[in-house]
């Protein structure tokens, strides 16, 4: 499990783009970006693996 803390710096950066953005929106964007990165890394790992069990998600 991953715990995400939105830093004041990230919130300031997001508000430079949209002054009305909420902390929850910034957190959701970070979570979505991390989930996408994990998916891409898993796809690459499976693509280079010769292990037929590599498609099974690891706990």
Image (cartoon, rainbow, N blue to C red):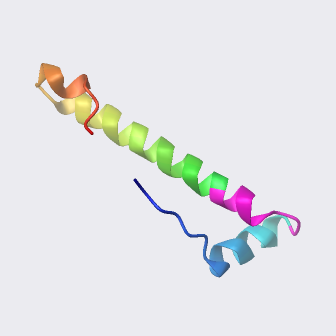
Q: Is residue 19 above or below residue 29?
A: below
Q: Which residue is painted at 11% across and 25% down in the image? A: 51
Front residue of this view, candidates 5 and 17? 5
Q: Is residue 46 above or below residue 3?
A: above
Locate residue 55, reporting x and y percent: 25, 24
Locate residue 9, reporting x and y percent: 64, 80
Locate residue 35, reporting x and y percent: 49, 44
Is 50 inside the magenta-drawn segment?
no
Which quadrant does the C terminus fall into? top left
Q: How many marks?
A: 0
Q: Which residues are magenta?
A: 19-27
Locate residue 46, reporting x and y percent: 24, 29
Front residue of this view, candidates 2 and 48? 2
Q: Which residue is painted at 49% across and 42% down in the image? A: 36
Q: Which quarter of the picture shows residue 16?
A: bottom right
Q: Is residue 43 left or right of residue 7?
A: left
Q: Is residue 1 left or right of residue 50?
A: right
Q: Is residue 24 above or below residue 41?
A: below
Q: Which residue is painted at 43% across and 57% down in the image? A: 2
Is 20 inside the magenta-drawn segment?
yes
Farthest-out residue, right: 20
């Amino acid at each position: 499990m991953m715990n995400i803390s939105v830093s004041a710096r990230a919130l300031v950066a997001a508000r430079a783009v949209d002054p009305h953005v909420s902390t929850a929106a910034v957190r959701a964007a970070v979570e979505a970006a991390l989930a996408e990165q994990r998916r891409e890394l898993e796809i690459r790992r499976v693509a280079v693996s010769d292990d037929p069990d590599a498609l099974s998600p690891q706990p």
